[in-house]
């Protein structure tokens, strides 16, 4: 078992007594344990270092209170800084009036992109919107079929074509959306096992020719720092508007959740908490901070 941040701080600051002030020297061991716990959670090194410096700056010179344990004081600061690092979050999806809102979903293969398209469509449908799902992942043979099955389960239409050209599939889907009065178009674009030029070219082409209102990256939290790296690459190519972090139900460490906003500046809007279609939740930095503290 890993030592949690709370446990680490508890033992490192045990000898501190009320009445003194927090100094670099008396916090050193405690902050080291925070840094170690972050690295064990697969947080990027730079992010962990910057974070610990922020906590140190916030704590330096503060009086060590007599009423609470010194470690609890630092835990509170760590908590606040974690919430700042991951937030603020706006979990609404802004919709256009008068013309369909296009959400371009992208991500690596296996990240949960197609499933998340279904989850998002379900959520919007339950809010009284009229989504259209678009099968524009022409790379993975089963993706079209998977989206069709999801659409049937949800009672939400799916636009698909027997085509090799994802741009024209998306363009045709826009005509279908208008003729069928669908006000949100969700594009399930291609993924690959790794970020590569061909993938990015295809996505940039859809971005240019279809002009989505929002580009949303689906990233797998279980892949830790790799998820952060791919978020950076997708953001460089597409200027992401939001990230949806999947499989948080299986990721106890939360390293990706912590690093993505700091590294890319792109907020996490929702998290996937399971394979079922109702397992999509707004991202809550406070809940995540408590989980990381342990
Ligand atoms: P894609 O290749 O990115 O389109 O990925 P899929 O949508 O096919 O998902 C890959 C696998 O991840 C499937 O088995 C999904 O059921 C699973 N999956 C997707 N989202 C989540 C999630 O939030 N939690 C869990 N536990 N599994 C998920």
Image (cartoon, grey):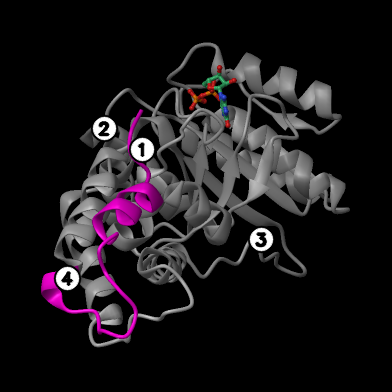
Marker disc for residue 26: 4
Judging depth in this view, the residue of 248 and 220 nearest the camera is: 248
Decide if residue 173 is in sight here.
yes
Residue 71 lies in quadrant: bottom left
Q: Quadrant of ligand 1?
A: top right
Query: Spatial distance from mark 3 to mark 4, Cα to Cα?
Result: 46 Å
Foreground: disc 4 or disc 1: 4
The disc, 2 or 4, on the residue closer to the chain's N-terminal end is: 4
Marker disc for residue 93: 3
Q: Quadrant of the image for the N terminus?
A: top left
Image point (31%, 33%), residue name: 199
The residue where tag 2 is placed is 198
Question: Marks 4 and 2: in contact by CB < 8 Å?
Answer: no
Query: Spatial distance from mark 2 to mark 4, Cα to Cα?
Result: 53 Å
Report the magenta residues as a range.
1-26
The disc, 1 or 3, on the residue closer to the chain's N-terminal end is: 3
The disc, 3 or 2, on the residue closer to the chain's N-terminal end is: 3
Question: Marks 2 and 1: in contact by CB < 8 Å?
Answer: yes
Neighbor class of circle 1 (other Cα within 10 Å; few <14, some 14-19, many 20+) is some
The residue where tag 1 is placed is 202
Query: Spatial distance from mark 4 to mark 1, Cα to Cα?
Result: 54 Å
Secondary-structure class at tag 3: loop
The spot of residue 58 in percent (x, y) is 30, 80
Secondary-structure class at tag 1: helix
């Amino acid at each position: 078992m890993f030592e949690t941040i709370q446990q680490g701080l508890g033992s490192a600051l045990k000898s501190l007594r009320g009445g003194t002030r927090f100094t670099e020297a008396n916090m050193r061991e405690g902050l080291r344990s925070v840094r170690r716990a972050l690295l064990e959670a697969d947080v990027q090194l730079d992010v962990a270092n910057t974070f610990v410096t922020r906590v140190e700056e916030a704590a330096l010179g503060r009086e060590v209170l007599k009423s609470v344990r010194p470690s609890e004081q630092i835990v509170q600061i760590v908590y606040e800084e974690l919430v700042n690092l991951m937030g603020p979050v706006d979990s609404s999806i802004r919709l256009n009036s008068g013309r369909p809102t296009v959400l371009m979903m992208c991500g690596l293969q296996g990240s949960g992109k197609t499933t998340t398209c279904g989850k998002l469509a379900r959520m919007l449908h339950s809010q009284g919107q009229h989504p259209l799902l678009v099968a524009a992942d022409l790379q993975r043979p089963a993706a079209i079929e998977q989206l069709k099955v999801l659409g049937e389960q949800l009672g939400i239409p799916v636009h698909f074509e027997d085509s090799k050209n994802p741009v024209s599939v998306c363009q045709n889907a826009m005509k279908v959306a208008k003729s069928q009065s669908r006000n949100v178009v969700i594009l399930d674009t291609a993924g690959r096992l790794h970020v590569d030029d061909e993938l990015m070219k295809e996505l940039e082409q859809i971005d240019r020719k279809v002009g989505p209102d929002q580009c949303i990256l689906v990233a797998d939290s279980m892949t830790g720092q790799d998820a952060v790296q791919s978020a950076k690459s997708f953001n460089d190519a597409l200027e992401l508007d939001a990230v949806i972090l999947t499989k948080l139900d299986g990721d106890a460490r939360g390293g990706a959740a912590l690093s993505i906003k700091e590294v890319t500046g792109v907020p996490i809007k929702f998290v996937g908490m399971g394979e079922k279609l109702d397992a999509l939740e707004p991202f809550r930095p406070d809940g995540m901070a408590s989980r990381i503290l342990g």
